[in-house]
């Protein structure tokens, strides 16, 4: 039986859009949106394709934007897949293929929901919009963040935004992300003096010197979180030293560590506390910080209520509101003062071999998206 959502998802999956390449995915979406009266504005930066599309909206009426990305992560060794990752396959009720869950399935659900909503509400009061990028999975430098900057520069207002990231855990809609933790990474180099291991008095081993600092870094309680966010966590991601020889004391130690932090802290407070530790342990060091995104939270209000109602209407249970997980492009959109939530399919197989999503979940998700449009724009 023909299903518009599944058919469109398959068309998108067939395009091997490894980040930041789009491979024609956006044009498929653009053609569908133009056919129902959307004005589409390409907003490409560097090697990244983006577009901003909008339809309707009377003076003073709110804008509801649906945001997502057409790029996908690499497949890994394709011999481990049960089928070609870019040949969408339906088996036992599941749609298989790279991007099925993250997030071409969501994109298909959004577009079909818009088509149904416009057909039923051709003169809708609010403005319906799409913000789509081809670089979310990689550097995310020329994608959503640049589009948001351009929209802000011309004073565009976006009251509500739904990001189609795969938020669900066991069944579609059981989890809605109404915020995300901040993410900041430190690239730390501890400086010592290289020398022969037999003459340690002529050298200065940075590994030995940094041991107490590393222990304090790992064992520090940064905060206890709050009612919306779990406690801030710190993880060492990379550590390297030495020349590869067993008789050389290294001259430098490199440590890379990342904080996923709550609204109890700012990135400035984290950096200041780390540097106080370094100075207390009397280390010679250089450090670079990379802020990926600040924490954001959308409390209960019109958007959260509309999303919750749509999930309850179709899934018969209330979603759990969480802020866990990694970062998403929602962190950039929130900078506009926009209420942002994430609602998408089950995330059990994202970035994995044999990525898949239940086909019926995508159809259900599309109905939820349409219900949200009806509540906020009709």
Image (cartoon, rainbow, N blue to C red):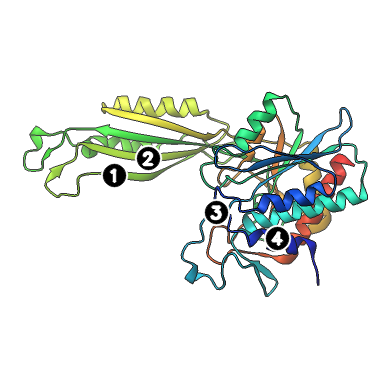
- Looking at the rendered image, the quarter that the N terminus falls into is bottom right
Outermost residue toward the left in this view: 198
Q: Quadrant of residue 217?
A: top left
Residue 115: which disc?
Answer: none
Q: Residue 18 at what x, y percent from top left?
A: 55, 54
Dot 4 corresponds to which residue?
9
Residue at mark 2 to residue at mark 3: CA–CA distance: 26 Å
Residue at mark 4 to residue at mark 2: CA–CA distance: 38 Å
Q: Which sits earlier in the primary sequence, circle 4 or circle 1?
A: 4
Judged from the image, the secondary structure of the residue bearing numbered disc 2 is strand
Dot 3 corresponds to which residue?
18
Outermost residue toward the bottom in this view: 92
Q: Residue 345 at what x, y percent from top left?
A: 68, 57
Residue located at (16% from left, 33% from top): 193
Horizontal relation, residue 29 to residue 262: left or right: right
Residue located at (80% from left, 55% from top): 112
Residue 240: which disc?
Answer: 1
Residue at mark 4 to residue at mark 1: CA–CA distance: 43 Å
Q: Which sits earlier in the primary sequence, circle 4 or circle 2?
A: 4
Judged from the image, the secondary structure of the residue bearing numbered disc 1 is strand
Dot 2 corresponds to which residue?
256
**Vertical placement of 337 versus 138: above or below?**
above
**Vertical placement of 120 versus 16: above or below?**
above
Q: Residue 254 at what x, y percent from top left?
A: 30, 39
The crowding category of the residue bearing disc 4, from other C-alpha atoms within 10 Å (few below 14, some 14 to 19, many at least 20), is: many
Of discs 1 and 3, which sits in the foreground?
3
Judged from the image, the secondary structure of the residue bearing numbered disc 3 is loop
């Amino acid at each position: 039986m023909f299903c518009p959502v599944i058919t469109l998802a398959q068309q998108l999956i067939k395009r091997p859009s490894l980040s930041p390449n789009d491979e024609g995915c956006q044009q498929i979406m653009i053609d569908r949106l133009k056919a129902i009266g959307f004005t589409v504005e390409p907003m490409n930066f560097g090697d990244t394709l983006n577009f901003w599309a909008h339809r309707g909206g009377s003076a003073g009426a709110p804008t509801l934007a649906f945001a997502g990305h057409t790029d996908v992560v690499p497949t890994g060794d394709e011999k481990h897949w049960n089928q070609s990752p870019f040949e969408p396959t339906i088996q036992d009720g599941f749609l298989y293929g790279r991007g099925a869950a993250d997030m071409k399935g969501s994109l298909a659900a959004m577009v079909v929901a818009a088509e149904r909503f416009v057909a039923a509400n051709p003169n809708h009061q609010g403005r319906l919009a799409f913000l789509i990028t081809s670089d979310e999975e990689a550097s995310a430098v020329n994608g959503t963040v640049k589009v948001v900057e351009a929209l802000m520069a011309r004073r565009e207002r976006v009251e509500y935004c739904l990001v189609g990231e795969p938020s669900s855990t066991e069944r579609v809609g059981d989890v809605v992300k109404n915020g995300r933790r901040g993410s900041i990474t430190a690239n730390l180099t501890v400086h010592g003096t290289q020398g022969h291991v037999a003459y340690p008095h002529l050298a200065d081993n940075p590994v030995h010197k940094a041991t107490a600092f590393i222990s304090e870094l790992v064992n520090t309680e940064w905060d206890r979180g709050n009612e919306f966010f779990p406690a801030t966590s710190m993880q060492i991601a990379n550590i390297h030293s030495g020349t590869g020889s067993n008789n050389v004391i290294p001259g430098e130690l490199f440590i890379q560590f990342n904080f996923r932090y709550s609204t109890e802290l700012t990135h400035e407070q984290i950096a200041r506390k780390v540097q106080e530790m370094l100075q207390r342990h009397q280390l010679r060091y250089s450090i670079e910080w990379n802020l990926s995104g600040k924490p954001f939270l959308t409390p209960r209000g019109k958007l959260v209520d509309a999303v919750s109602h749509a999930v309850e209407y179709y899934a018969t249970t209330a979603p759990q509101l969480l802020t866990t997980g990694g970062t998403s492009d929602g962190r950039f959109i929130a900078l506009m003062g926009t209420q942002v939530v994430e609602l998408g399919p089950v995330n059990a197989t994202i970035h994995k071999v044999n990525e898949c999503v239940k086909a019926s979940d995508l159809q259900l998700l599309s109905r939820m998206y349409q219900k949200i449009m009806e509540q906020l724009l009709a």
